Amino acid sequence: MKFIWRWTWRSLLLALIALLLVQFWFVVHIWYWVDHNPGVTAFMQHRLETLRGKDPKATLRHQWVPYRRISVHLKRAIVAAEDAKFLDHEGFDWEAIQKAYEKNLKKGKVVAGGSTISQQLAKNLFLSGERTWWRKAQEAAITVMIETIMSKRRILEIYLNVIEWGNGVFGAEAAARYHFGVTAAALGPEQAARLAAMVPSPRRYPPGHETVYLQRRAEIILARMNAAQVP
């Protein structure tokens, strides 16, 4: 019995050390990305592997552009659509989370998220898309790290450069060229609102594709953009 307890405590200690090392690995990467741009995120790598499962020569469309070369209309559209309290919270919008929980409870399934831009960035940079308690806990921990280490401007800059906007299309520059044939800097208000409306289901909308939902969602975002505050 004594041997079993000793083995158990040693196993727990080793597990704790391993967990702390993993968290340190996350912190180091986030610190590095304060001044350096991420190359391929975990989500981008996953999408590339999926695409290459069908076409071994498949590549991603992605070109990093600095914050100043992204249209302010797109910045406002994304904040209006995804995280209206972006500048006010410290990583979590508890009111939005509560509303999402109540909506999901009423529907009996997950139909709303309530994730902030910082939470979405944490997931895109490091994690898989699986829905488990462990992954959500790790996402929360990484979100705290990101909000502690990075400025809001840097968080939004990275987010706009790594989120998906089509099948294998990542970042504002690739999205602007793919959907509208312009640069990210040249996006107008209507174009920005449309791109923001695509974010929850980016692979559903190829260039020029129109749906009633997409049109209405873009109109709602457009109406909210002037009130959206961006860093």
Image: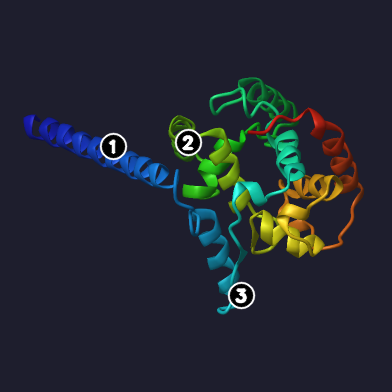
Q: Which residue is mark 3?
A: 54
Question: Looking at the rendered structure, which numbered label has been put on residue 150?
Answer: 2
Kind of residue indicated by mark 2? Met
* Secondary element at image label 2: loop
- Of label 1 and label 3, which has the lower sequence position? 1
* Marks 1, 3: nearer the viewer: 1
The residues tagged by marks 2 and 1 sit, at their Cα atoms, a distance apart of 21 Å
Q: Residue at x 64, y 47 (%)?
A: 68
Kind of residue indicated by mark 1? Leu
- Of label 2 and label 1, which has the lower sequence position? 1
Q: Which of these two is toward me, 140 or 4?
A: 140
Q: Residue at x 73, y 47 (%)?
A: 71
186, above or below 53, in the image:
above
The residues tagged by marks 3 and 2 sit, at their Cα atoms, a distance apart of 37 Å
Q: Are marks 1 and 3 in contact (CB under 8 Å)?
A: no
Give the quadrant of the C terminus.
Answer: top right
* Secondary element at image label 1: helix
Percent coordinates x, y for residue 126 in the rendering: 46, 48
- Of label 3 and label 2, which has the lower sequence position? 3
